[in-house]
Image (tube, rainbow, N blue to C red):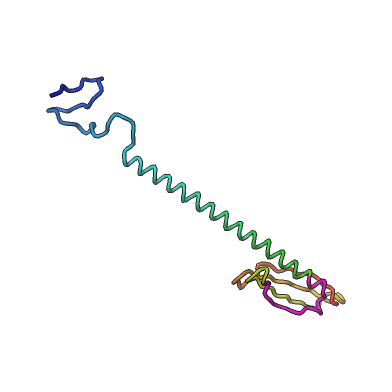
């Protein structure tokens, strides 16, 4: 039988009668308890979820911005086509912008402006599967 460790000496301390006490459950060496590891994992999970949601929000904003830029370019291109051909030579008032931009649609509305040979022309561009236009451009166009 070994003698109990004295104060200041390394080893396990024992309580009365040689039984281990509650303080003996954790060794004096370095390490973490299961509870500490679980709390750290929970904090890490919360941080990762927060970062992921902010990244997804930025991506969503970037995609909406890209759609708005594309809609502006498509409407501007369609308006330029109308200016070159003339309002009277307009073949399609509505249509699809395929094959270059599948799903995107346009609608052209013209009305007399009261300024001689100028017509108020509005070009609306609709993104795929949308009921409302992403953008509407209006311009006075010469009637040829």
Image vertical order of residue 125 relative to residue 30, above or below: below
Q: 99 or 87, which is in the foreground? A: 99
| Residue 91 position in % (x across, y down) | 76, 79
Number of numbered discs on residues: 0
Would residue 68 appear left or right of 13 to someone viewing this image?
A: right
Q: Quadrant of the C terminus?
A: bottom right
Q: Does the magenta-highlighted stretch encompass residue 58?
A: no
Q: Which residues are magenta?
A: 81-98
Q: 130 or 74, which is in the foreground? A: 74
Q: Does the magenta-highlighted stretch encompass residue 91?
A: yes
Would residue 27 appear left or right of 139 to someone viewing this image?
A: left
Q: Which residue appears at 78% of the width and 78% of the height?
A: 90
When asked about the image quadrant of residue 122, the answer is: bottom right
Extreme right residue here?
A: 116
| Residue 78 position in % (x across, y down) | 75, 70
Would residue 36 appear left or right of 137 to someone viewing this image?
A: left
| Residue 5 position in % (x across, y down) | 20, 22
When asked about the image quadrant of residue 136, the answer is: bottom right
Q: Which residue appears at 73% of the width and 72% of the height?
A: 123
When asked about the image quadrant of residue 1, the answer is: top left
Extreme front residue here?
A: 99
Q: Which residue appears at 57% of the width and 54% of the height?
A: 58
| Residue 82 position in % (x across, y down) | 79, 73
Image vertical order of residue 107 relative to residue 36, above or below: below
């Amino acid at each position: 039988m070994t003698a109990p460790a004295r104060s200041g000496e390394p080893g396990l301390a024992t309580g009365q009668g040689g039984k281990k006490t509650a303080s003996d459950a954790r060794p004096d060496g370095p390490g973490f308890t299961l509870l500490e590891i679980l709390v750290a994992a929970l904090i890490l999970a919360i941080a990762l979820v927060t970062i992921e949601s902010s990244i997804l929000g930025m991506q969503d904003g970037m995609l909406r911005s890209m759609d708005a830029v594309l809609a502006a370019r498509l409407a501007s291109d369609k308006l330029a086509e109308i200016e070159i051909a003339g309002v009277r030579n307009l073949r399609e008032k509505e249509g699809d912008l395929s094959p270059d931009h599948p799903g995107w649609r346009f609608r052209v509305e013209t009305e007399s402006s009261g300024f001689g040979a100028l017509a108020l022309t509005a070009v609306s561009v609709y993104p795929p599967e949308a009921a409302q236009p992403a953008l509407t451009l209006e311009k006075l166009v010469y009637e040829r």
